[in-house]
Amino acid sequence: MEIVIGIVGLLIGAAIMWYFAVQAANSRYKQIVSDAEKDSEVILKNKLVEAKEETLQMKSEAEKQINSKTSRIQATENKLKQREMTLNQRQEELNKKRSETDSIRSNLDNQLNLLEKRAAEVEQAHREAVSKLEIVSGLSAEEAKAQLVESLREEAKTSTQSYINDMIEEAKLTANREAKRIVIQSIQRVATETAVENAITVFHIDSDEIKGRIIGREGRNIRALEAATGVEIIVDDTPEAIVLSAFDPVRREIARLSLHQLVSDGRIHPARIEEVVSKVKKQIDDEVVETGKRTAIDLGIHGLHPELIRMVGKMKYRSSYGQNLLQHSKETANLCAIMAAELGLNPKRAKRAGLLHDLGKVPDDEPELPHAILGMKLAEKYKEKPDICNAIGAHHDEIDMTTLLAPIVQVCDAISGARPGARREIVEAYIKRLNNLEQLALSYPGVLKTYAIQAGRELRVIVGAEKIDDKDIERLSNEIAHKIQTEMTYPGQVKVTVIRETRAVSFAK
């Protein structure tokens, strides 16, 4: 019984618990549904607000675009209206000008008709006057015209000749004055040292004992040295000196440096001589290139071909009439730059042409060509500009001058070679050249006396007044100058002055 009651109680408790559980679940379900409904309402409201905001934003952007397009359209319409007004004004102005032009044309037509009528009247009057003059003078119109033309021709010829002479004299005065100014200014601004070169080099030694060591046993050392350097070595009774003789300055310099190293080292024998000479030759080659580079840098010349730089360096060991070729080329380059600047030309190109103008004097081979032509060919080979090549080739008139650089290089070359102290000659050769210069001018008929002055740079020719007139002296001076240029060798240039003088002397007693 108790068991039954217990079971019934459990069942009742279980039913009560299930009821409360169902109630709790129902209340929780209702709560969840209510919360979900509230959340959905909030989300819906938010979405509606966002949609309204996006709609307003899109509306405002559309209004902005419409406003901007409207303003652009309005501006375009304003421009079109303004352009239309301008065109209307121009059309009115053209109409006014057209009407004015028509009135002017009609006026000119009227005046032209009047002029034609007057011209016909003048022609008729001229014919009547000509016929009257023919009757009075007894000459036809053609004969009178011929006489008048001849008279006017002679008068014009005289006036023209006088005018030409005046202009020539004025041009000579002006040109000489301006040329002297430029030349003097250029010379004053350029000062270079004068280098004097000989055909021999004296090598000084400390004692005669070293002479014997240089000569060697049976002369083996000196023969080896001469064979290696190509220089004649003269060992005589001159105390403490050995003479190196050669026309090539490079060879003399190689021999001098080799001797210096051999004497300093003390080991003098044929094998050592060949070794030292080989090293000195390499040293000289490097020095030549370095000299060329330094010269180009000093003058501000860029872009030279390496072979041209080497040739410029070789100029250090060449001379003409005792004037060092490198110093002469540098001096000519500076003179060219100054003169080109004075004349309004490119000073850098002039300086380049001045430096390279004697390039043909230092070739590796010796072809049978004038040095100016050879220098021009070398410059063309190494891609120099045509105006520079022409200046190099024309500086001794072997070819025609085609640029303004050519006469500048020619003049500056003459200035550098003809300045006092620049060059020197052997006395005998100098005297012979002056005598030949005077005898050449004396060979012309009508020449009485000749005088070579200014160290052979000027030739004064005195002619007989009864044998040669004033018209022929200019021709004579040109012929003498041309013959000197073609038949003689001389440094710089020679000025030929022909003098004709007539004197009448009387005595009052």
Image (cartoon, rainbow, N blue to C red):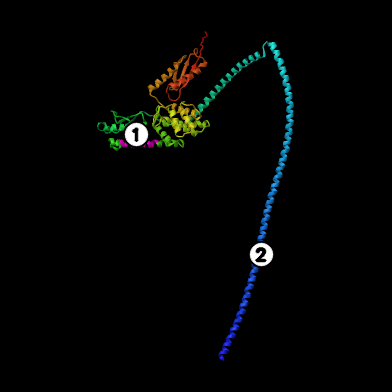
Which residue is rendered at x = 73% and y = 38% of the image?
92
Determine contact: label 2, label 1, CB under 8 Å.
Answer: no
Q: Is residue 386 above or below residue 452?
A: below
Residue found 46% across the figure and 17% down from its top? 461
Decide if residue 39 is on the left or right side of residue 484.
Answer: right
Three-letter code for the amino acid on which mark 2 is drawn: Leu
Q: What residue span does the magenta drawing correspond to?
A: 274-288
Where is residue 103 drawn, in percent x and y?
74, 31
**Nearer-the-camera pick, 54 or 269:** 54
Q: In which image quadrant can residue 205 be found?
A: top left
Q: Nearer the viewer, residue 176 or 52?
A: 52
Q: Is residue 116 visible?
A: yes
Badge 2, how many Cα within 10 Å: few under 14, some, many 20+?
few
Q: Secondary structure at mark 1?
A: helix
How many residues crowd around disc 1 within 10 Å: few (fewer than 14), some, or many (20 or more)? Answer: many
Residue farthest along the bottom direction in this orientation: 1
Read off the residue under disc 1.
254
Q: Is residue 143 above or below residue 252?
A: above
Spatial distance from mark 2 to mark 1, Cα to Cα? 107 Å
Asked if the stretch drawn in magenta spans residue 123, the answer is: no
- What kind of element bears circle 2? helix
**Amino acid at dot 1:** Ile
* Left or right of 271, for residue 351: right
At a point 61% along the width and 78% down the height, the residue shown is 24
By secondary structure, the bulk of the magenta-drawn segment is best described as helix
